Image (cartoon, rainbow, N blue to C red):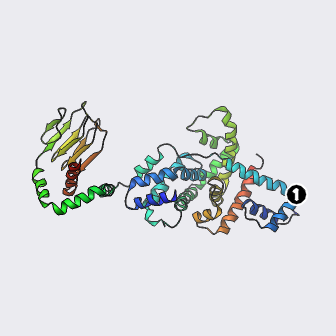
Amino acid sequence: MDLMVQRRIKQVLKGDQNAFGEIVELYKDKVYQICFRMLWDRHEAEDAAQETFLKAFLNIHTYNQDKKFSTWLYRIATNLCIDKIRKKKPDYHLDAEIAGTDGLNMYSHLSSGDQLPEEEVESLEVQETIHQAILLLPEKYRSVIVLKYIEELPLQEIADILELPLGTVKTRVHRGREALRKHLRHL
Amino acid sequence: MTSCPKQIVHYMHEYLDGEIENDAKEELKFHIETCEDCKRHYLELKKTIALVQSASHIAAPAGFTARVMALLPRETKKFGVERWLRNHPFFTAAALFLLLMGGGFFSMLEQADNHFAFTKNSELKVENETVIVPAGAVIEEDIVVKNGDIRIEGEVDGNVTVINGERYMAAAGSVTGEIEEIDRVFGRLWFEIKSLFK
């Protein structure tokens, strides 16, 4: 797959947009997933994911072909999401509080758009609690937890994506896990 | 747990990351078996990880790729020709050969090509060097227009090629095949060579 991606990138560098479409197809789910887990809003996640690919296309000449393409792409996505989280911090606190009191706000986020059968509601409530716990993490812990446990990437790759020393990533994973434990141990 | 060695929790995390030294692993194992608090702490961490990993995987919404592609800056026209040349090396070689060897061919092409011409089809209407595909008409063949324009109001079930002219598409008009506008000498030569070999 890597070889195929490298070939597509060479075509994109020559100006072939169709080749870029194939790259988008390959990575759209992963990128969207990172954005969704970081931002916890479908519209914002789609905006962020689209922006990620647009940025990748415009800056494709800065990508070093000796490195893994996904690392470079995920870095763009996480940086964009972290920026977005920082910009809208006050909203998030408000959101989280409302959700903490009755769970309605976050829940309606998830169910908007698709109708779900009754039996899925219970597992959805568990999902809801998990997401809320992830959302309550400060963004520096949230990014490592999403990359480690949702994207299931190795620690070294996470360090490459976030451009942080491996030790820092480990510390953040540890602290993130402890913070999550506090929210989730009673489930 | 207040009396437990401080490194125990640290060992738990090292263990969860799969990066623990053997000595530390033994110490952790032994401690967890004897200390209820630490055992609970460890199990809670395990559960937390399992819960976070259970977060259902979601896919990008439908039509995502198309929306991304629409955001990209327009591909340069130059590239379309380049891609064509790259994908058809035989024609490229043939074109170069003819270009170098067949000067006469080129001038012949020039002479033959200055008048208005188009694919004969009874459905087509003509108005001042503009070929019109009338609304409601369905033309089931490829259309080539030279030195003139085409206006598509109906349907074309095939390719449309316009040489030295403009293409206008009405809202209701549609073309199932490829639409090509060739207006540079080289592009025209190209098209001629292409049709020679057909």
Residue B164 seen in render: yes
Along the horizontal axis of the image, is B42 left or right of A80?
right
- The kind of residue on which mark 1 rests is Glu
Instruction: Name the residue rendered at 73%, 61% in the picture.
Output: B18
Q: Residue furthest right?
A: B34
Looking at the rendered structure, the number of numbered marks drawn on it comes to: 1
**Quadrant in the picture for residue B3:** bottom right
- Answer with left or right where residue A77 lies relative to residue A20: right
For this view, does A17 lie left or right of residue B136?
right
Q: Is residue B72 visible to us here?
A: no
What residue is at 53 percent from the left and 46 percent from the top?
A: B60
* Residue position marked by numbered label 1 in the rendering: B33
Residue A158 drawn at (x, y percent): 61, 62
Query: Is B100 or A124 nearer to us in this picture?
Result: B100
Give the chain letter at badge 1.
Answer: B
Q: Residue furthest top?
A: B136
Residue B46 in picture, x, y percent from top left: 76, 53
Residue displayed at 11% across by 50% down: B112
Q: Nearer the viewer, residue A11 or B46?
A: A11
The crowding category of the residue bearing disc 1, from other C-alpha atoms within 10 Å (few below 14, some 14 to 19, many at least 20), is few
Residue A25 image offset from top left, x and y in percent: 48, 50
Q: Which structural element holds mark 1? A: helix
